[in-house]
Amino acid sequence: MYLERMNISGVDFTSDIINRIQGEIDAHPVISRVGLSRAVCGILDWRSTAGKLKEMSCRVALLKLERSGKLRLPKAHPFRNLAGRPRLKIPEPLSESVATISCDLKSLRPVALECIKSSSSKASREWNYIMGHYHYLGAGPLCGAQIRYLIKDGGGRTLGGLSFSAAAFTLSCRDNWIGWSSAARRENLHRIVCNSRFLILPYINVPHLASHVLGMLTHRIAADWQQRYGYEPVMLETFVDPRRFAGTSYRAANWVHVGKTTGRSRQDRNSVLEVGEKDVYVFALKRDARRILCIGSLSEKQSGTVADAKKPLPADWTEEEFGEANLGDRRLDKRLLTLARDFWAQPQSNIPQACKERAAMKAAYRFFEHESVTMEKLLYPHYQATIARIRATPPIVLAVQDTTELNYATHPKTEGLGPVSTNKNGAVGLFVHDTLAITPQGVPLGLIDVQCWARDPAEFGKRAVRHSLPIEEKESNKWLLSYEAASNVQRQCPAIMVVSVGDRESDVYELFVKARDTHNGAHVLVRARQTRMLAEGHENLWETIRQKSPVILTEVIVPRHSNHPARKATLEVRFMKAVLSPPLDKKKLGKVTLWVVTAHEINAPEGMEPVEWLLLTTKVVADTADALEVLGWYSRRWGIEVYHRTLKSGCKIERRQLGSADKLEACLAIDMVIAWRIYYLTKMGRETPDVPCTVFFDDYEWKALVTHVNHTSTFPEKPPTLREAVRMIASLGGFIGRKGDGEPGTQATWLGLQCLDGISLMFKYMAEAYAPHLLDSSVLHKTTYG
């Protein structure tokens, strides 16, 4: 049975919640609507990213519930301070010279932007005046959250003004350009702000002034918005009336024209107003703004609504991982599923080999050339499928992040690649920073974030300069972006504890600050690399914790590395709570409180470097059990190394030849999901060995496998278990299965899958021609198992 619900402002109001709100009203009949909205926000824990109650959104929701007949609100109390107040009039002209200013931009510098902080200030009255008199839209009202600025020259003269306010709720050209779903739009729309007013006074004649001001704004609007509202926008939008302006200043400031409006205004609910089409421009404040905006709530298919109950279940795993992709054309959506099946069947083959037929090969290349096919759009449905698996895997999930480089030295003429080595004329390629959700038992649940970029060759050798840049302009920001994705999953899965795990490279102080300031965010666990100082006593963290007595001895398996085999290490464990001081050049970031866990190997084998981990985490470590749990979490970080090895060696992604970095990224999106599924299959064969293999394989596939491996034409009454099937597949890839060999790894699995494709297809063709009864399956195929 499904509960009746209404989704308002991104919150599901079920019948139980509505009844609880009505009970609150009935119990307190004299409660004001302001008080009621605060109470409801408390009940739902409805807060902004800054942790503040979203009272205005709640009041809107309550009014909609009342108008729909689902709620009886208390009588509204008028605001006494507004009773009888006259309407606001446009202020009288200020004592400002209106003489024409005609000069070059250099003569006006420094141009400054004055942020208006109070609606009753002189600056606010001046802004209202110039907009009311000189802007064709007037002074307002502006919608939603907003910031206004006055533009001043070096002498304090007013040159104009501008404002930013809430973005349009739906805008087809913008939404198509971003590639987000309706769920992601509801989740992340607040991270787009609209440049709703921009005015250079008509008596100011200064070339390039407008584009210069826009450039200044794009460098400070995020910080100003963060200070006022507690979160950073990642994209700007604006509307330009082509009957009045050509949009030259926006183009000169690197804004991107993404299309036109339909000619309706925000208030035109009935499509009766004729306001004329406007050009739409956007500006990405972050390099991967589109990727950030596409990280949203669960899609409607996975949210469990009544309407979704009528949708058919996915036919196979490709529909489960890619079925919700929205590429703007059903033919592209269908081709995506076909390519995923082909890549899965032959993970090590190039595109012509995987597609088998010439027509399919040509269609594949056209697919990757299409402008709508981007990494963000292709990975979005997989992110949602991953979140669904996370929801079903309580109570802890590790969001392990790491960077790997893709070397395309064999075809360096590919457009858009950058250096990936320390040699200026060395190898070229791409960098990929991904975040893999892994259970504490080591089962990979899927990707939740992927960042891909090429370094600018012109920036080669300028590493020293980067120390003076803010974190947002450095590659180190990848750790913060991954943490944002993990925190987004945490908010969508409140019953799960999400822990963002990183290696020594992730020891970035800004990451700890972001975790400190993020409401309902994920926990952080990183291995320390930097020398950290304690806030009290200014002592060295490393030296302080080494002086403590070990609380326990434990053993961990150290994975095989280079020529050194895997081994068991005995570790001394220590832990403590620490308040850290910020680095000397980052004092404004303030202190952070973390828990520290160290593990030091004793009696290391001769010639082996002893294991020594110093782990920093936001998770409270209260006792020895907590410390051992944190060590266990970090030991699972190795899983992402296995995944990257599967991606490179198993899927041969560095051999792809597609002509440009954009096409490689689109192909990479499919390969990354294939690599995850290979890894997932291998681990599930160990974690759930007794389930039937039909959770992963079609009827003809397991029959072909049994026939080939056992050299028999007789099938068992029941399909093999998943463990048996994985071991048979691995045997095709060289796994011997001796007593001391353990379970097969990903390498044997991907090689075996390559062989199984040809074997199973031949079996299917022969059975269709001579024994079609062999293809009848009596086993339920559960693609969503696990």
Image: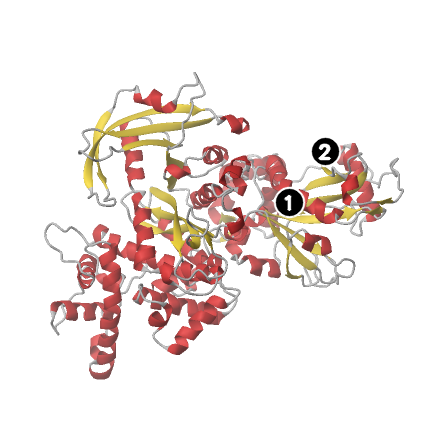
Asked where in the image residue 523 lies, by quadrant, the reply is top left
Q: Nearer the viewer, mark 2 or mark 1?
A: 1
Q: Residue furthest bottom?
A: 769
- Three-letter amino acid code of the residue under disc 1: Thr
**Above or below: residue 587 compared with residue 408:** above
Is residue 112 visible in the rendered structure shown here?
yes
Is residue 1 visible in the rendered structure shown here?
no
Question: Residue placed at 67% from the left, 43% from the top?
Answer: 217
Q: Which mark is residue 218?
A: 1
- Three-letter amino acid code of the residue under disc 2: Ser
Tell whether 456 sits left or right of 637.
Answer: right
> Which secondary structure lies at badge 2?
loop
**Above or below: residue 624 compared with residue 373:** above
Q: Which mark is residue 118?
A: 2
First of labels 2, 1 by sequence position: 2
Tell whether 632 sits left or right of 227.
Answer: left
> Which secondary structure lies at badge 1?
helix
Label 2 to label 1: alpha-carbon separation:
22 Å
Residue 568: x, y in percent? Answer: 19, 37
**Above or below: residue 589 compared with residue 55:** above
Residue 25: x, y in percent? Answer: 56, 38
**Above or below: residue 582 compared with residue 751:** above
Q: Which image quarter holds the C terminus?
A: bottom left
